[in-house]
Image (cartoon, grey):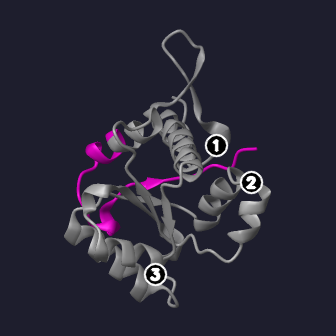
């Protein structure tokens, strides 16, 4: 009997189907779909001015605005236990929980930065060099949400809750 596929490697994400053809396994397929949706969502929200980034800006917005304006808050797992940011990170997560703001846990703040910078004009990117991407609010678009936002909303609906520790991780993949 063959060993089960290694789900920790992108190189072993194909498995044989009932006909012997190699297909993408369901878990990896869902991660790829989420990754594409996250990249499209961030790019579109950035181009439409619907992003708020950095602890101070996010906290101020949460404190002074209705949570109905917020689609979700993106929080990178790699910063969750960073001693320099832990208090601010937990404060934002707690405020999101209290306000029932959807949180999406991603693996790396630098990948979030790259996605956003890739969709900004070079002039805008230069001005954002000092911005922090340790948390990012994505605001709603009225009257309707783009398809990429809808996919992330479906993901959140599959994993309801507001406890950061128990949220599933969305692994961001670098793309060119």
Whether residue 7 is visible to the viewer of this picture, yes or no, is no
Image quadrant for the C terminus? top right
Q: Residue at x 58, y 67 (%)?
A: 109
Kindly indicate the quadrant of the structure image that contains residue 150.
Answer: top left
Q: Quadrant of residue 15?
A: top right
Of marks 1 and 2, the one in the foreground: 2
Q: Residue furthest top?
A: 19
Disc 1 from disc 3: Cα separation: 36 Å
Foreground of the two, 26 or 17: 26
Which of the two residues, 81 or 117, is positioned nearer the viewer here?
117
N-terminal-most mark, 1 or 2: 1
Question: Which residue lies under the disc numbered 1?
Answer: 10
Q: Mark 2 = which residue?
A: 121
Compared with 61, 112 (above or below) is above
Tell me, yes or no, whether the highlighted magenta stretch contains residue 172: yes
Of callouts 1 and 3, which one flags the residue occurring earlier in the amino acid sequence?
A: 1
Residue at position x 30%, y 74% in the image: 64
Near mark 3 (Cα within 10 A), the count class, few <14, some 14-19 or many ≥20, is some
Residue 33 image offset from top left, x and y in percent:
51, 36
User: Residue at position x 31%, y 63% from top?
Assistant: 166
Q: Which residues are magenta?
A: 154-176
Q: Which residue is mark 3?
A: 56
Left or right of 75: which side holds 6?
Answer: right
Which residue does the image show at 63% across and 38% down from the upper left? 12
Element under label 2?
A: loop
Task: Tell me the crowding category of disc 1: few under 14, some 14 to 19, or many 20 or more residues within 10 angstroms, Cα based.
Answer: few
């Amino acid at each position: 009997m063959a060993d089960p596929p290694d789900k920790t490697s992108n190189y072993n994400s194909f498995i044989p189907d009932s006909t012997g053809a190699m297909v993408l396994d369901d878990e990896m397929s869902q991660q790829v779909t989420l990754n594409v949706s996250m990249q499209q969502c961030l790019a579109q929200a950035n181009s439409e001015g619907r992003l708020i980034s950095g602890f101070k800006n996010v906290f101020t917005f949460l404190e002074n605005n209705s949570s109905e304006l917020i689609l979700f808050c993106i929080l990178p797992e790699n910063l969750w236990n960073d001693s320099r940011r832990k208090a601010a990170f937990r404060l934002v997560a707690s405020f999101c929980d209290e306000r029932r703001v959807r949180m999406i846990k991603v693996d790396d703040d630098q990948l979030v930065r790259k996605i956003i910078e890739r969709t900004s004009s070079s002039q805008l990117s230069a001005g954002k060099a000092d911005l922090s991407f340790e948390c990012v609010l994505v605001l709603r678009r009225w009257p309707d949400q783009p398809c990429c936002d809808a996919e992330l909303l479906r993901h959140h609906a599959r994993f309801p809750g507001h406890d950061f520790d128990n949220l599933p991780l969305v692994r961001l993949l670098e793309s060119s």
